[in-house]
Structures are given as structure tokens and as C-alpha cells.
């Protein structure tokens, strides 16, 4: 047993010794490999360092060459600039010398002129003394002062020139009238055509022209069935017998009147006038007008940029296109009020969109009061409240005529904008009293002239006829009176369009044979 244990121990010791020997052998081998790797790394590092040094020297050389080139170019530029500055300095010196020379010349000329002026003053003084002596001699001979002679001469020359000028102007005007008559007729025709729509869209009446009298019978129809069908379909009244070649459409509702006008014009062009065709055409134009009304309202809202508005309110806004108040179009007036109110709000730092909205809707009730009882203020307020408008807009509608107190600053802006739009020159037709005053002022201006016997303002103040005394006023003076009256009217009166001034000089010879 003891022998086994000793043998095992000896074997263990021998094994450990062998293992230690193998380990030392392997360690020596690894150390050799590591040294080999270190030598190779040092060799490679030396090679790379040499390569980097070589590259650095190459780049440094290139940079040095480029820097020397840049310095050379800059030196050349500096040299060129120095040369330019030297040349400019030479030019300036030359100009300075030239200016100095010119200054000396001007000074010499000025001295000469001063001497000449002094001499002229002395001669003028001597000449004036001689003239005064001659005037005294002439006054003694003529027994008239120089001022009296001057006034008499000027009066004679003025009278002569005045008659010659008036005669010349009269000849030129006659030539112009002879050559411009055709052009004037063309211009007047165009003006009438352009104003036709505004003139026919009055409060209650529209007019349709007929191609001939026989068309009236076709419109009336057998036993009046066509005209009854038309009036029933459109809700208007046709007046056929009042004027030749014209049919007057009467109705307080401007939309119905416009539908009737368009439908009647279409039927006249088409020639097929019968109850079935009448109903078809009226329905067609009713649809077109409804679409046009809706589009007009939408365009107004879009142009003003006031956001979304209820469709029913938009339709009422479009209806204002066919509504007139004192000759002013309702839609144009409402948009004008909206623009003005928006501008005022912008200046005051208020909500511009709300101000425009209130301005556009302030008269919307005028599209309702044609067929409903109540003022346009009350009807517009109720309708907008029903369709969800804000209190600030509702108060502006209620208060724009002072029926209700204005509780918001925007309401005051709408009131101001409404007044500005209605009161500006040309916005509305003049009142009866203003019309009468204008006629009286026309006649008064004409009667103030010497030689005028009578003056009559006719054609609603578009023409004034002046009758002069033929014994005291000649033909040339008639032209002058007409021109003077025209100038005074233009200076003193305010009127739309133009006013024709006619001065009439007439001599009647009368004898009685017995």
C-alpha cells in the first residue's frame, strides 16, 4: 500500500515536471513570435513615417509655390492700381488747372459785364430823362395826360382784339361742328347704349322695344290669352297701348320685372308666342335669374373676404343687385359700405372682417320689404338673427338708421360708412328742391348779362336758352355771351353730365297791308 502511494506521488511529481517543461518551451516560442511581430511593426511604422514626411515636404513645396504665385499676382495688381491712381491724379491736376483758368476767364467776363451794366444804367437814366421831357411836351400839345392816352389806346385795342377773337372762335367752332357732326352722333349713340341699362332699371318700370306694331297683336293673343298668361306667369303688368313700338313692364318687385323683361325680349326674338311657350321661357329665365342672384351674392362675399355666410343670406345679398334706392344700386351700395367700414376698422385696430360683414348686411332687409310688411331694418335684423349672425352684426343692422342704440364701435363705423356712401357726389339722384334750385340758378346766371331779355332752363336743366335784344347785341357778342355763361356755370354750379347754352338773337320785320 505504501509502495503504491509512493509510486503515485513520484508519477505525479514527474508529470508536473513534464508539464512545466512543455509550458516553458511554448512560452519561449510565443515570445519569439511576438518579437518578430514587433520588429515587422517597427519596420512598417518607419516606412510610413518616411512616406508621410515625404508627402508633407511635397505639399509644403506646392503650397510655397502657390503662395509665391499669389504674392506675385497681388504685387502686379497693386502695381496696376498704383499706376491708375497716378494717371487719375494727373487727370485731376489737369482738370484743376483747366477749372482755374476758366474761373479766371469768367471773373474777367463778369467784370466786363458789370462795367457794361453800369454804363447801360447811366444811359437808361439819361434816356428816361429825355422821354419824360418829350412826354411833357406831348401832353401840352395834346391836352391829355399819358395815362389817359394809354387807357384810351388800350380800350380801343382791347375792343378790336375781342371782336376779332370772338369772330375767329366762331369760325373755328362752325368748322368743327361741320366736320365733327358724324363723330358726335356716334359718341352720343354709344353713351345712350351704355346708359340704357341704368335708365331702364328704375324702381317700378322696365321698357322693351318692339320691332313693329304687328308684334303687339301677337303678344296680346286671341282674346288676350297670351298677355294674361304672361302676366300670370311673371306677376307683372304689361302696358302696350301707352307708347308706340314700346311695351312698359310695371311691377314693384325688381326681380320679377327683370325676369319679365328677359322673357319678353326672348319671345319677341323667337316669334313663337303662345301660352305653353310663354310658361317655358319664363321658367327658364326665372332659373337663370335665380342662379345669377346666387352668383352675385357669392361674388360679393368672396370679393370682401368675410368668410362663410348662410346660403339664404347670400341669396338676399344677390337680390340687392336688382334693388335701387334713390337711383343707387343696393348691392353696390352695400359693398361700398362694407369696404369703407372695413377701412375704418383697420385704421382703429378693430376686426376688419366683422366690420365688412356688418356693412354688407346692413341693408339686406331691402330685398325683403318689397313683399313683406315692415321696415328693411326690422326685416333684415330678424332674417339675419334667424340664420345665426353674431350680435355685433345684428346691432349694426338695427342701429344704422338710429332705430336702436349702437352698442358696439363697429355699429358706429357702419353708420358712418352708410352716410359716406349715400352722401358722396353722384351716389344718389338729387332731390326735387335741389333740382328746382339748379334750374333757378341757371336762369339767374343768364339774366345777369347785359342785353339778355329772357332765359329759360329746359330739358330738366340740360339746356338753357337765352333770348337777347337784337338792337343792343350783335352776332359776335352772342358768341361771347354764350361763352361767358358757360364759364360761369362751370365755376359756380355742380351738375351731372353737360349743359347746352343757346343764345338766340332774332329780328322780326312786320308790316300790315291795308
Image: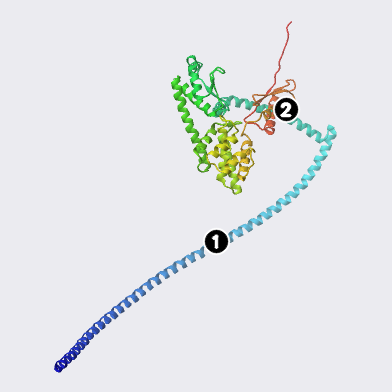
Residue hosting label 2: 444
Q: Is mark 1 on a helix, strand or loop?
A: helix
Q: Is residue 434 above or below residue 27?
A: above
Residue in the image at 50% along x and 39% along y: 310
Q: Is mark 2 on a helix, strand or loop?
A: helix
Going from N to C along the chain, the mark reached first, 2 or 1, is: 1
Image quarter where the C terminus lies is top right
Label disc, if present, on residue 88 of the rendered structure: 1
Image quarter where the N terminus lies is bottom left
Percent position of residue 282, x then y: 47, 25
Q: Can residue 69 be seen in this view?
A: yes
State the residue in front, 189 or 276. 276
| Cα–Cα span, label 2 and label 1 | 78 Å
Position of 58 with respect to 508 (left or right) is left
Residue sticking out furthest to the front:
1
Q: Is residue 174 above or below residue 221?
A: below
State the residue in front, 147 or 512. 512
Position of 71 with respect to 323 (left or right) is left
Percent position of residue 385, x then y: 55, 39
State the residue in front, 173 or 80. 173
Q: Residues within 10 Å of mark 1 (few under 14, many from 20)?
A: few
Amino acid at each position: 500500500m505504501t509502495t503504491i502511494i509512493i509510486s503515485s506521488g513520484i508519477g505525479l511529481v514527474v508529470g508536473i515536471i513534464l508539464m512545466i517543461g512543455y509550458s516553458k518551451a511554448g512560452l519561449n516560442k510565443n515570445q519569439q513570435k511576438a518579437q518578430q511581430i514587433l520588429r515587422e511593426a517597427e519596420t512598417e511604422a518607419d516606412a510610413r513615417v518616411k512616406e508621410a514626411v515625404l508627402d508633407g515636404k511635397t505639399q509644403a513645396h506646392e503650397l510655397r509655390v502657390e503662395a509665391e504665385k499669389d504674392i506675385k499676382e497681388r504685387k502686379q495688381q497693386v502695381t496696376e492700381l498704383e499706376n491708375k491712381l497716378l494717371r487719375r491724379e494727373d487727370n485731376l491736376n489737369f482738370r484743376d488747372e483747366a477749372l482755374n483758368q476758366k474761373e479766371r476767364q469768367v471773373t474777367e467776363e463778369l467784370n466786363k459785364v458789370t462795367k457794361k451794366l453800369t454804363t447801360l444804367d447811366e444811359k437808361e437814366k439819361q434816356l428816361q430823362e429825355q422821354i419824360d421831357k418829350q412826354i411833357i411836351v406831348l401832353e401840352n400839345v395834346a391836352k391829355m395826360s399819358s395815362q389817359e392816352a394809354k387807357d384810351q389806346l388800350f380800350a380801343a385795342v382791347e375792343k378790336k382784339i375781342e371782336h376779332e377773337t370772338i369772330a375767329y372762335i366762331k369760325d373755328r367752332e362752325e368748322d368743327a361742328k361741320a366736320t365733327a357732326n358724324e363723330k358726335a352722333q356716334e359718341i352720343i349713340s354709344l353713351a345712350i347704349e351704355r346708359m340704357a341699362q341704368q335708365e331702364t332699371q328704375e324702381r317700378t318700370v322696365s321698357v322693351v322695344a318692339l320691332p313693329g306694331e304687328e308684334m303687339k297683336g301677337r303678344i296680346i293673343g286671341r282674346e288676350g290669352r297670351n298677355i294674361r298668361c304672361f302676366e300670370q306667369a311673371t306677376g307683372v303688368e304689361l302696358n302696350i297701348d301707352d307708347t308706340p313700338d314700346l311695351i312698359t313692364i310695371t311691377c314693384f318687385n325688381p326681380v320679377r320685372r327683370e325676369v319679365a323683361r328677359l322673357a319678353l325680349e326672348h319671345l319677341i326674338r323667337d316669334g313663337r308666342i303662345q301660352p305653353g311657350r310663354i310658361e317655358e321661357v319664363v321658367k327658364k329665365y326665372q332659373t337663370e335669374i335665380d342662379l345669377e342672384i346666387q352668383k352675385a351674392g357669392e361674388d360679393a362675399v368672396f370679393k370682401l373676404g368675410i368668410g362663410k355666410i348662410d346660403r339664404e343670406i347670400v341669396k338676399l345679398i344677390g337680390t340687392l343687385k336688382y334693388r335701387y334706392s334713390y337711383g343707387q344700386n343696393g348691392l353696390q351700395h352695400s359693398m361700398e359700405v362694407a369696404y369703407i367700414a372695413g377701412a375704418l376698422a383697420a385704421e382703429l385696430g378693430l376686426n376688419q372682417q366683422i366690420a365688412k360683414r356688418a356693412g354688407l348686411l346692413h341693408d339686406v332687409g331691402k330685398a325683403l320689404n318689397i313683399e313683406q310688411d315692415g321696415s328693411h331694418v326690422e326685416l333684415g335684423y330678424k332674417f339675419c338673427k334667424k340664420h345665426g349672425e353674431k350680435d355685433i352684426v345684428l346691432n349694426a343692422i338695427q342701429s344704422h338708421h338710429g332705430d336702436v342704440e349702437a352698442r358696439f364701435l363697429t355699429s358706429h363705423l357702419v353708420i358712418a360708412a352708410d352716410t359716406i356712401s349715400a352722401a358722396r357726389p353722384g351716389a344718389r339722384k338729387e332731390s326735387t328742391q335741389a333740382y328746382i334750385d339748379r334750374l333757378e340758378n341757371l336762369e339767374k346766371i343768364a339774366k345777369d348779362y347785359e342785353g339778355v331779355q329772357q332765359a329759360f332752363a329746359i330739358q330738366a336743366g340740360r339746356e338753357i336758352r337765352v333770348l337777347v335784344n337784337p338792337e343792343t347785341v350783335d352776332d359776335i357778342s352772342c358768341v361771347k355771351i354764350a361763352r361767358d355763361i358757360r364759364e360761369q356755370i362751370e365755376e359756380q354750379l355742380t351738375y351731372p353730365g353737360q349743359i347746352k347754352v343757346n343764345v338766340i338773337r332774332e329780328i322780326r320785320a312786320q308790316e300790315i297791308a291795308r
